[in-house]
Each structure stands twice: as structure tokens, then as C-alpha cells.
């Protein structure tokens, strides 16, 4: 897998987590722990994407 393909895959997963987060936030019985977990996973993916993008710039 190329770095660009890997970044695209991570972006897709990040988008799916954003959709999941929005669905949880829209739920009247949203669980704070679930929200925090989704946000943590999104941040981890974002960090991975940034590291890969930085590696392609150098």
C-alpha cells in the first residue's frame, strides 16, 4: 500500500468515526464514555495522517 493510499484509508475511517460521533451525539441517551472513545480514536487517526503527510513532504 502506498503512503497516499494509506492516508486515504485513514481519512475514510476518520470520516466514518465522525458519522458515528454525530449519531451518538444526536441520541438522547448519549454515553459520555462512548463519545470520549470515539473522539480519542479520531484524534489517533488524525495524528497518524499528519505523520504520514509530513513524511511525504520530506
Image: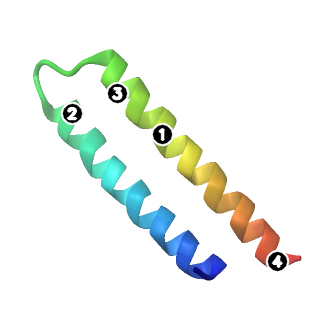
Q: Secondary structure at mark 1?
A: helix
Label located before the other in sequence (4 or 2): 2
Can you identify the residue that label 3 sits on? 35
Give the CA distance from mark 2 to mark 3.
7 Å
Can you identify the residue that label 1 sits on? 41
Give the quadrant of residue 6.
Answer: bottom right
Q: Secondary structure at mark 3?
A: helix
Give the quadrant of residue 14.
Answer: bottom left
Give the CA distance from mark 1 to mark 2.
14 Å
Task: Looking at this view, name the residue that lies furthest to the right.
Answer: 58
Give the CA distance from mark 4 to mark 1.
25 Å
- Above/below status of 51 relative to 21: below
Check disc 4: other Cα within 10 Å, few if <14, some if 14-19, many if 20+: few
Label located before the other in sequence (3 or 4): 3
Can you identify the residue that label 2 sits on? 24
- Above/below status of 13 relative to 29: below
Can you identify the residue that label 4 sits on? 57
Q: Are marks 3 and 1 in contact (CB under 8 Å)?
A: no
Give the quadrant of residue 7.
Answer: bottom right
Amino acid at each position: 500500500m502506498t503512503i497516499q493510499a494509506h492516508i486515504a484509508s485513514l481519512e475514510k475511517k476518520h470520516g466514518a468515526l465522525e458519522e458515528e460521533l454525530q449519531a451518538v451525539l444526536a441520541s438522547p441517551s448519549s454515553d459520555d464514555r462512548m463519545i470520549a472513545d470515539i473522539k480519542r480514536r479520531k484524534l489517533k487517526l488524525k495524528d497518524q495522517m499528519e505523520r504520514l503527510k509530513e513524511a511525504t513532504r520530506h
